[in-house]
């Protein structure tokens, strides 16, 4: 394997709108990016539309829910990553999740079980001494249970708690773990949802927060969402129960 001259970034769930914007930024920084997703053709088409030089880009298949294939996927990577971004996402409405177990279960698999499966493999790899950062894309929906989206929110809450413990576990190895706690993002996953326009953030804005992540654990992009995050955390239960 040729020696890497720049950092290698592994993006899991690379076809999300945020992930694709993050990939563009990592490539501009001179990084080598491994874009892993079930939707490899869509990523290739996106990069072609952006006239991206793909010399430092590898597009490969990854299914977060195919747990039995994760070991083979990781072992077959062209290079071990310095930075890992987990951005895989799936969502059904709360009303649907309550009556459709398959939809609920898939959210649990994509947001939590799949993340734990592949990230555990990465962080316990004794041959990768270059690992320096794990970044997870989570959601404010996981900060406080709300009646409008508590099934989805519970999967994001579990993912955030996993990353919090992982950060402690990796502290002695000086591997940084960040969680991006995002509010409403204008994306294909939220298309058609009745969300307030004034609170929607662009995928590029979230991607900037990812690429520029510092040493802190919880990163909440956007001033308005920082305020909302604090309100959700500390709102008394009687008032929280009145939230949609």
Image (spheres, rainbow, N blue to C red):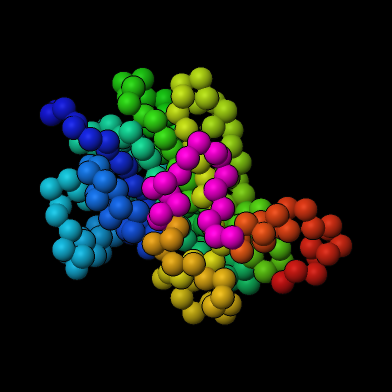
Q: Quadrant of residue 16?
A: bottom left
Residue 9 percent coordinates (x, y): 30, 41
The residue that appears at 16% across and 27% down in the rendered structure is: 3
The residue that appears at 47% across and 33% down in the rendered structure is: 176
- Is 232 displayed left or right of 31 in the figure? right
Quadrant in which the C terminus is drawn: bottom right
Q: Is residue 217 magenta?
A: yes
**Considering only vertical position in the picture, is 6 above or below 160?**
above
The number of numbered discs placed on residues in the rendered structure image is 0
Residue 52 percent coordinates (x, y): 17, 58
**Is any atom of residue 140 visible in this view?**
yes
Work out whether residue 123 or residue 30 is closer to the camera in this orientation and state it: 30
The residue that appears at 50% across and 26% down in the rendered structure is: 170
Residue interval drawn in magenta: 207-223
Single out the residue that lies furthest toward the right: 238
**Is any atom of residue 108 visible in this view?**
no
Q: Quadrant of residue 96?
A: bottom right
- Is 192 displayed left or right of 243 in the figure? left
The residue that appears at 72% across and 66% down in the rendered structure is: 147
**Considering only vertical position in the picture, is 50 above or below 69?**
below
Quadrant in which the N terminus is drawn: top left
Residue 165 percent coordinates (x, y): 59, 33
Single out the residue that lies furthest toward the front: 223
Q: Is residue 73 magenta?
A: no
Q: Quadrant of residue 71?
A: top left
């Amino acid at each position: 394997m040729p020696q890497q001259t720049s950092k290698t970034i592994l993006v899991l769930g690379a076809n999300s709108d945020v992930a694709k914007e993050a990939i563009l930024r990592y490539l501009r920084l001179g990084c080598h990016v491994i874009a892993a997703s079930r939707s490899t053709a869509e990523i290739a088409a996106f990069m072609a539309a952006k006239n991206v030089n793909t010399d430092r880009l590898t597009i490969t298949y990854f299914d977060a829910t195919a747990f039995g294939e994760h070991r083979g996927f990781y072992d077959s990577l062209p290079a071990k990553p310095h930075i890992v971004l987990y951005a895989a996402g799936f969502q059904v409405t709360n009303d649907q999740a309550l009556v459709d177990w398959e939809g609920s279960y898939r959210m649990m698999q994509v947001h939590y079980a799949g993340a734990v499966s592949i990230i555990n493999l990465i962080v316990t790899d004794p041959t990768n001494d270059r690992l320096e950062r794990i970044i997870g894309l989570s959601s404010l929906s996981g900060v406080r249970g709300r009646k409008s989206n508590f099934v989805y929110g519970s999967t994001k809450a579990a993912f955030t708690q996993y990353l919090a413990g992982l950060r402690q576990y990796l502290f002695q190895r000086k591997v940084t773990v960040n969680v991006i706690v995002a509010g409403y993002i204008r994306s294909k996953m939220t298309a058609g949802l009745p969300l307030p326009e004034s609170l929607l953030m662009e995928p590029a804005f979230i991607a900037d927060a990812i690429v520029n992540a510092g040493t802190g654990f919880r990163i909440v992009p956007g001033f308005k969402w920082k305020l909302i995050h604090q309100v959700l955390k500390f709102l008394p239960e009687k008032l929280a129960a009145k939230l949609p």
